[in-house]
Image (tube, grey):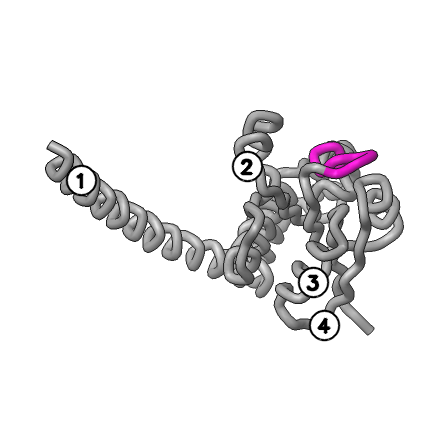
Amino acid sequence: MASQKVLIVDDSKAMRMQVRDMLPKGNFEVLEASDGVEGLEIINQENLSLILVDFFMPRMNGWEVVQKLQDNPKLKTIPVVMMSGRKEDVEQAVPDQFNYFEFVGKPFEQTMLVQAIKSAMVKARIRQQSIPKTGLDANPSVIAPKPATSPPTVSASSNPEIQALQMQLETLRQENIKLRAEVDGLKKQVGQIMTFIRQKLK
């Protein structure tokens, strides 16, 4: 039986199949929805580990789905990858929400999708850690005054999942550094080519 469930929400069946094929192989079940309304029904029924959602869809778009997640404390910590071929439109519509979900532009390759998933997991973990505790969890001194502050520290340092996410984040940072260097190199080459063309046109 699958230990984790992943939801792909896209109005294109071909896109859903492509994303399904690109997902890393593992012990998880992949669910699909053709629009935001259908996706939200699955989200409310299933215990999901990851949501990949298209931004532009009929009936309910990806941003509306994310808003529903944000309004529900039980759902807001699910990692979200937003997919779209029009990043500029997404940035104009929700410029302040890229810290909530991870974006991947269509068309994309498997490596780009995997990196987006890893980054989305990191962002979700940060959200989870920032949620204020309630009830007895908010006041551990009611049960055990002395170790009230020590359990979070021990848990964070010994939790393998957090350590794995930290390693993934560091890997992403290193990859970003490499990408920036490559981009700088390409910019330099383009500048040289443009200079050469201008000289030829004179």
Q: Quadrant of residue 25?
A: bottom right
Q: Quadrant of residue 194?
A: top left
User: Is 144 situated left or right of 46 in this image?
Assistant: left
Give whichever of discs 2 and 4 has the lower sequence position.
Answer: 4
Q: Position of residue 140 (x, y in %)?
A: 71, 43
Q: Which mark is residue 20?
A: 3
Q: Is residue 156 above or below residue 35?
A: below
Report the front residue among 89 and 6.
89
| Of the two numbered discs 2 and 4 in the rendering, the one whose residue sits closer to the viewer | 2
- For disc 2, the neighbor class at 10 Å (few under 14, some 14 to 19, many from 20) is some
Measure the alpha-carbon separation of dots 3 and 1.
Answer: 45 Å
User: Is 176 situated left or right of 188 in this image?
Assistant: right
Residue 109 magenta-drawn?
Answer: no
- For disc 4, the neighbor class at 10 Å (few under 14, some 14 to 19, many from 20) is few
Range covered by the magenta-colored residues: 57-65
Q: Position of residue 201 (x, y in %)?
A: 15, 35
Question: Which residue appears at 38% of the width and 51% of the height?
Answer: 176
Going by the numbered disc 4, the residue's amino acid type is: Asn
Report which residue position mark 4 lands on.
Answer: 27
Q: Residue furthest front?
A: 201
Question: Which residue appears at 76% of the width and 68% of the height?
Answer: 3
Give whichever of discs 3 and 4 has the lower sequence position.
Answer: 3
In terms of secondary structure, where does tag 1 sit?
helix
Give whichever of discs 4 and 1 has the lower sequence position.
Answer: 4
Report which residue position mark 2 lands on.
Answer: 87
Report which residue position mark 1 lands on.
Answer: 197
Q: Quadrant of the N terminus?
A: bottom right
Report the front residue among 164 and 133.
164
Give whichever of discs 2 and 3 has the lower sequence position.
Answer: 3
Going by the numbered disc 3, the residue's amino acid type is: Arg
Q: Is residue 171 above or below residue 67?
A: below
